[in-house]
Amino acid sequence: MDKRKVFLGLVFGMGALLAAARYAAATEPFAVDEHTVLLLHLDEKQGDPVDSGPNKAMVSNQGAGWITPGRFGWALNFNGRDNYLRIMTDKISALSEITIEAWVCVEEKETKNTIFYIGGSSSLYGPTLWLFADKGYISLLLSPPEENIVVWSGKADLSGGWHYVKAVWGKEHNNGVGQIYVDGVKVSGDGKPWKEDLADTATMFIGSYQPGWGDYYFQGKIDEVRISNRARE
Ligand SMILES: [Ca+2]
């Protein structure tokens, strides 16, 4: 047998195995490690979710309904009108890297389904970061107070049940260009860079942009949310 073909076969085989291993890692509930900023398993069945991460952030449930089965155990159902989670902690300041991970089940909706938003309502807090899905695309939008908005976006079919979404950015990572993955496949990796820290504020939202600002509410189910202060590729 041609040694070169054997070698190439091994290389491609290893690549496929590594890709499969990365995806397999997301087929069980997320775990806590030293880079975890927030971890929501969303298995509480009622009331406010509990942060299983080290910061023990206060999480306030604004009307999302507990539902089972989720992706793992229970999950939250967002009505697309006024449901969201507000997350408050004084343990998180300007991040220079971030990874947002969540399992989402998006219902039919043409407007922006916000998965995650971090940042204040005032330009005092610096650039905000917003992850949303709409019209067959998923986008990570970085909005500095006084400069042009940076958008990283890619095609993603989020219909038909649960999908694992991961968005990654770091000012020293990938030349400052954000990356988005859906079910372990990179859907976006090009665009302008951003090389400064994120908003210096501890307010985050899941399922909503800044509440009351536009029809940017998530419609569907969300389970397992993990935010990390590290670019996890
Ligand atoms: Ca769950």
Image: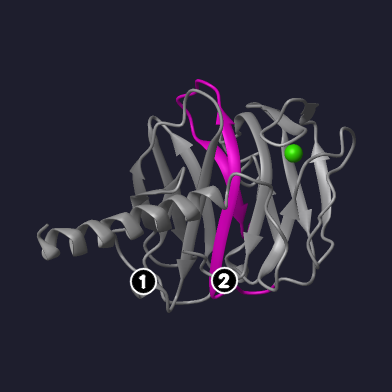
The residue sitting at 26% across, 62% down in the picture is: 11
Q: Say if the magenta span includes residue 48.
A: no
Is 210 situated left or right of 194 in this image?
right
Label 2 vs 1, first from the N-terminus? 1
User: The disc labelled 1 sits on which kind of residue?
Assistant: Asn
Q: Residue 55 or 52: which is nearer the viewer? A: 52
Q: Which residue is mark 2?
A: 230
Is 74 situated left or right of 188 in this image?
right
Does mark 2 have its CB less than 8 Å from ligand 1? no
Image location (x, y in percent) of residue 156: 38, 37
- Residues in magenta? 93-121
Considering every residue shown, the one lying at the far right of the view is: 47
Residue 17 seen = yes
Dot 2 falls on a residue whose secondary structure is loop
Q: Locate ligand 1 by image quadrant.
A: top right
The residue sitting at 30% across, 64% down in the picture is: 192
Q: Which residue is mark 1?
A: 174
